[in-house]
Amino acid sequence: MSVTRRSLLTNAAMISAGAVLPSLANPAKAQANAIRIGVPTGITGNWAALGQQIQRACRLYAKTINAKGGIDGHSVEFVYEDTQGDPAACMRKTTDLIERGGINLITGIISSPESLAVMPRLNDWNALYLATISGAGSLTAANFVPNVFRTCTSGPMRAKTIADWIADSSKKRFFSIAQDYAWGKSSVATFEKLITDLKKEPVGQVLSPLGTKDYSSYIARIRETNPEVLYIAMAGDDATAFLKQAAQYRLADRMQLVTEVLDIVNIKPLADASVGLYGVSQYNFAYDAPGNAEFVRLFKAEYNEIPDTFEGEQWQALEFLAEAIRRAKSTDTAAVRGALEGMEIDSVKGRVKMRACDHQAEQQVFVAQVGKTEGVPYPVPKIIKAYPAEAVVPGCRKDSY
Amino acid sequence: MGSSQVWLNLTLNTLALASLLAMLTIGLTLIFGIMRIMNFAHGALYMLGAYSGIAAAQLLGNFWIGLLAAPLAAAAFGSIFEYTLLRRLYRRDGGSFLLVTFGLSLVLTEAIRLIFGPNTRDVDLPSVLSGVVWFGDEPYPAYRIFLIALGIVVLASLAFVFLRTRLGLLIRAIAQNAEMTHALGIDVQLIRSLTFAVGCAFAGLGGYLAVPLITGYIGMGGAAIIDAFVIVMIGGMGSFFGSAAGSLLVALTQTFGNYYLPDFALVATYLLMICVLLCRPGGLFGEQE
């Protein structure tokens, strides 16, 4: 018996094709009168760690609200599907949830390309989507659709925050590294324009393909360019790998590192090597607000850990959604959409308003630095300055300033 | 950083990456050479090695324990798999091997995710490896130097076994003509099982060694196996030296490609494969089929 390369490749192709066939399993059967919310998120794949945060927040939310009798007497039920972080798979799973599962409320999609893939269909589906991670500016600008609400911060908002924060610094030369897809590109473009306006100099840029794990060549390029500040727009497992290698090459000794996404999940594996790192903390467990204290208490009791960025962001989205359903007295798409527009809530980040014109939630953005804190065994992002919504949210349906 | 330092930096990066790639592909190519099967589960075993190494190192608080635990765990798991499943398939065609090994890789990956969770994992390096080596005023991670040294030692020992020992002779004999070797009174099955276990052990070791560089994450196996297949194609399927040369070429392309032409980073490796296969359809060290 022998295997030729051709037969091997044919077989390999057949197997790969089989692996992506749609799952035939039905979404969980509905409980009578329950409010069902679809969560097509990354359960496996590059975003699995973020997908876990989404699921943990949803599970805790369902448990908490159902213990109090649900929303106006209706229990809340989440239906999870695995998109593997792939826009095509996300489209398929979302279609399943909506067309076969009869669900009209969607949240928890991770990457911007996945969000952008499903958004054009939402009107035909008569379904709402609350974006909780996807940061690409265009979601609430060029690609705006009425059935999408972004409750989290956007990439341009975070880039603006960092630009404002370094405006006073004497540092002039900036290098950017970002993941090569919608969000990373959007953030770097915004950031470079803003610092150019500040008469500072972007001296170089690298876009790394998603899934890159060896960053040594990029680090060599950064060192050769020798900037004063390195701006990082990376998330997920890639960000962990990059920050780790940056520490091994002692980059922080030569330049200031600022990351647009300062998440516990990325810095935890670095342990003490992450101390001192600056960045944007979209949600911070230590933020002093009544809603946050309660959330952190519930979260610690359930998972014996402090909540990370997207656990907080997802929680904020679910508070928006629940309040909108209460006010609309229904889960009807048009009614909930109407209720969400212009709605203000006291959330885990303080007062947050969902503006009606482009459905971007107006909220403050925190600059944080990694340091040690009492009661947590690993270094965490600590807020050093909060930027109010007025300073960082772009104009309506805009993703630039 | 001056241009000579950039070159030194990139060259060392190439060698460190080549060491990692070689650990993975040599196992793959040995198994192919002697068994004529493409082990799709090799990437999952690489990940199994990484996670068992991390678990052992964390349990005993010692990085070096992981270097022992990772290959042992992968070899043990691989042997059980070979004994219980693969042996039944030797009389069938290559397609059934692909299906079974591919299925195993899915099961194993998912099992690891269920046990360890989806978050990335890391291992603490001992101080001798976590430091830097200075080239002029440029720091270089000591761990990458360690990878290069270890890669050279492993490859040299394997080459010695392959070319200078009776076991190496038998492996080469079985790769050339298993039936004839069997007819001469050699326990072919035993050698096959042994080679499979050794191949898995190297995958496991490679996985654990990759952790301090890229962290351990779900999906590390799938990402690595693609490079490994490309390298095996470039080097020539079943060729030990081809794999070593292929690892070096792919590492060179990726490292220098990412530096000089970052926009072509994704296609560079495949372009290399296409060029090699156009010139030598059997791969650099392989025979044309």
Image (spheres, grey):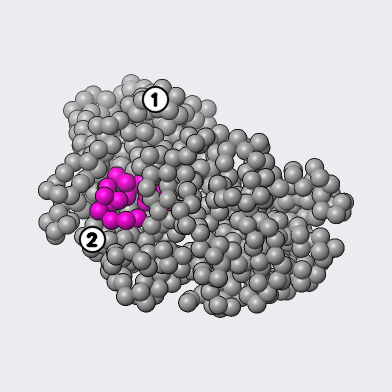
Residue closest to the eye, A36 or A395:
A395
Q: Please tell me which residue is depicted at 42% across the width and 50% down the height of the picture.
A: A369
Q: Residue at x 51, y 59 (%)?
A: A386
Q: Is residue A183 above or below residue B206?
A: below
Q: Are marks 2 and 1 in contact (CB under 8 Å)?
A: no
Q: Which mark is residue B61?
A: 1
Q: Main secondary structure of the magenta part?
A: helix
Residue B28 can be seen in this image: no
Q: Secondary structure at mark 2?
A: loop
Q: The numbered mark 2 sits on a residue in which chain?
A: A
Q: Position of residue A170 (x, y in %)?
A: 29, 65
Identify the residue at horizontal 55%, vertical 77% (top origin): A395
A261 left or right, relative to B255: right
Whether the magenta-drawn stretch holds residue A313 is answered as: no
What stretch of residues is rendered in magenta? A239-257
Residue at the spot 55% in from the left edge and 54% down from the top edge: A283
Q: CA distance from mark 2 to mark 1?
A: 37 Å
Q: Amino acid at mark 2?
A: Asn
Residue position marked by numbered label 2 in the rendering = A226
Judge the density around disc 2: few (<14), some (14-19), many (≥20) Cα neighbours within 10 Å: some
**Does residue A290 appear in the picture of this structure?**
yes
